[in-house]
Amino acid sequence: MRLSARLVQRKSFAQSPFWSSSPGTPGWGTPFGDKEQIGNDFEGYIAGAFKDNGVVFSCMLARMMLFSEARFAFRRFRDGQPRSLFTTSELALLERPWPGGTTGDLLGRMLQDADMAGNAYHTTVDDEGRYGRAAVGSGRRVARLRPDWTSIVLGSRSGNLRDIDTRPIGYLYAPPEAKKVLLLPDEVSHFSPIPDPAARFRGMSWLTPVLREVKADKAATKHKLKFFEQGATISTVVSLDKDITPAAFDEFVARMKASTEGVDNAYKTLYLGGGADVTLNGSSMKELDFKATQGAGETRIASAAGVHPVVVGLSEGLAGSSLNAGNFEAAIRFTADKTIRPLWRNAAGSLERLLKSPGPDASLWYDDRDVAFLSDNTKDVAEIQSKQAATAKSLLDGGFTPESVVEFLDTGSLTVLEHSGLYSVQLQPPGGAQPAPQPAPAPAPSPEEA
């Protein structure tokens, strides 16, 4: 079946806008149609979470700031083991992905889309209006495909997309009121760190499982704002004489509101006439243990983001002894090893589709050597360098070539070590004869002697 014919039988996976949906609502994660789209309301995530919730923004910002620090290089494999990193001119596409853009800008955009839509799509274009593999002209650059306008087109030999041989046969970019573009699978970088269990090829946003926590945190923030707007009290009960007339009651309520409600009237002395009795039903946020209630929700959101609360700077992360050196370094290792390094590895494999490979034994990899966040303290660096120097001396004394020793220290693979064929004198048997000195070569005859 031709690709154009397969596009006629499109299948889409979608769900209702997330701010108004919940599990059990018709359409929540229900597959219908013939292509795979993102499984949420992208603009809803932007407006309702990223731009409207401080905890979500802080977690995403921490992830993005760390993730965007990496660079890329190629690495070769020999006998299944990675060798040293190297660069080619092809990497210029990632170093300057678009005019004025940097590798950090590209990585930041990738992670933003993946965080809110579960997927990030990119391809290449040039100044001649060509795209994908055809974009080989001047001005070749990386182009972002907005995830909610991009669909994964599926196909199978039988035409039944539930068959086991179903695979992506293209990416359809269909922005509203604009030209639709169909790209082949090897022309699109598809970054989807968290697989969506309801789909075969698309990813899922880490925000999806904690939507209720986001809503609860927004409600708590609104409640806190109302606390200060309503005179810095939780609730005030005023009892009046039972014989008061409706007109007098309404007048009393209006004058009471005017003189007591609002931040400007907080903490003023309240004066009441005869027959009025005031009862305060909770007078401080402490009585609700508000900080603990909201802090627990913040930690759950940070956990879903894979970022330690100490790194984000959340209240529970900053409590007690969490900021001592040992705990902070543990928080860094937790965030880097659990979240950031797997994201870099995934991004390298995704972006590799946009580049010309330097060979069948090479692949794109991330270079984190200049990432300050991952740098150890001075004492640890000194100890590591001291051990590496001792290892290098031992290997050189053993007769290994300097080049292979340097590569071993860089890769950690013993298979890269190459022996020079020369051995230290300590390896000679006791009393053994020393190698006879080689005679010096005869001097070349002078022109007169010739």
Image (cartoon, rainbow, N blue to C red):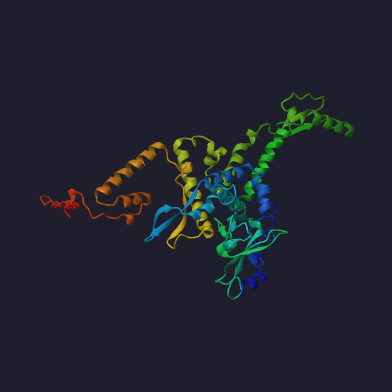
Image quadrant assignment for residue 1:
bottom right
Q: Residue at x 55, y 38 (%)?
A: 313
| x, y percent for residue 115 | 59, 51
| x, y percent for residue 71 | 49, 49
Image quadrant assignment for residue 413:
bottom left
Q: Which of these two is toward me, 84 or 114?
A: 84
Q: Is residue 157 visible?
A: yes
Q: Is residue 222 left or right of residue 333?
A: right
Q: Which of these two is toward me, 53 or 238?
A: 53
Name the quarter where the C terminus is drawn.
Answer: bottom left
In the rendered view, would you say 21 is above or below 242?
below
| x, y percent for residue 97 | 56, 52
In the rendered view, would you say 172 is above or below 1?
above
Q: Is residue 348 left or right of residue 219?
A: left
Q: Is residue 201 visible?
A: no
Q: Residue at x 83, y 32 (%)?
A: 253
| x, y percent for residue 138 | 58, 56
Q: Is residue 431 left or right of residue 305?
A: left
Q: Which of these two is toward me, 187 or 201?
A: 187
Image quadrant assignment for residue 197:
bottom right
In the rendered view, would you say 416 is above or below 376?
below
